[in-house]
Image (cartoon, rainbow, N blue to C red):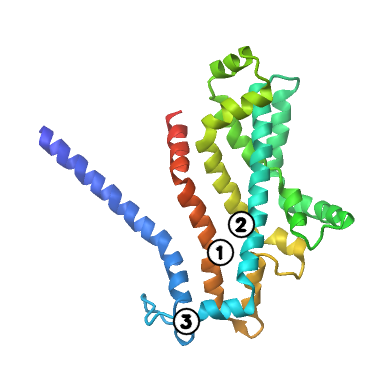
Amino acid sequence: MSEQAVGDHGRLRTVRAHGVLAVLSALCVFPIYWLYATSLRRPGDVYSLSPLPWPLSVLSYTDAARQVDVAHLLFNTLAMAGLIAVGQLLTGLLAAYAFAAWNFPLKRLLYIAFVGTWLVPFQVTMLPNYVLLMQLGLLNTLMGVVVPTLCSALGVLLLRQHLESFPRELLEASAMDGRSSWTTLWTVVVPNMRSALSALAVVLFVNAWNEYFWPAMVMQRSNAVLQLGLRSFMGTEGTDWGPLMAVSGLACLPVFALYLVLQRNIVNAFVRSGIK
């Protein structure tokens, strides 16, 4: 086969691969597009199957603002998800650094036991946590949602894998310079793990943002966060789809914004993981 034929065959395979990726991307994006399209339809056109919402209308957003305090729900949800993500990131970083950089008795067994908690179903710890929150007087508060979820075995597992491949020479050089383990962590390790930490931060934030069952259990009948506020548009008489889609669309925006801000670091984390 000639060199030109080989090149043409390679380009054809590239075009096909990109075509498949374009189709899959469209299938993934279409539900999001339909959500925003429905939110921008007039109330009488909510059930329309037209792909284009025309004429455009913001009545669904104004109706949603009249029924619930969207700004307050957004703030509470941002605070809840942000605190959970930061807490899990911090505890995960400290635990992963200890497991990766230090040698101590029963290290492997403790690590397996710690990560094994990830396999414990949430329903097993749900009731003990609920009883503890009731005794502490934290029911119906955002801190009651946050405190029991400040530690994540997933964060420890992912960060330890990155720290295991961290150059030991840098840690040894830092120790020779007289730096403590705490100083080494924040001045040597963390600056070189920004990509991995950013990628994990997005995962933890999205997990906390999408959580419904635990906030519903702790907050009980209170609609203090967006996930619970959506219940206001679903009643025995039916679902008010326009405002529901409007608030759901607003709920997606903080996650999109976070990803756009950290996009480069996230891509770098996946590329470096692939190289390793």
Label 1's element? helix
Residue 90 placement (x, y as % from top left):
66, 39
Residue position marked by numbered label 2 in the rendering: 209
Which residue is situated farthest in the right direction here?
135
Q: Which residue is mark 1?
A: 251
Q: Which mark is residue 98?
A: none
Mark 2–mark 3 Cα distance, whole angstroms, equals 27 Å
Dot 3 alpha-carbon crowd within 10 angstroms: few under 14, some 14 to 19, many 20 or more: some
Q: Are marks 2 and 3 in contact (CB under 8 Å)?
A: no
**Residue type at mark 2?**
Trp
x, y percent for residue 92: 66, 37
> What is the C-alpha distance between the residues marked 1 and 3?
19 Å
Disc 3 marks a residue whose amino acid type is: Val
Marks 2 and 1, how far apart in space?
9 Å
Residue at 15% x, 41% y: name it: 8
| Coordinates of residue 200 in the picture (x, y in percent) | 56, 42
Q: Secondary structure at mark 3?
A: loop
Image quadrant holding the N terminus, namely top left
Q: Which is more foreground, mark 1 or mark 3? A: 1
Question: Dot 3 corresponds to which residue?
Answer: 46
Q: Quadrant of residue 234?
A: bottom right
* Residue 185 placement (x, y as % from top left): 63, 27
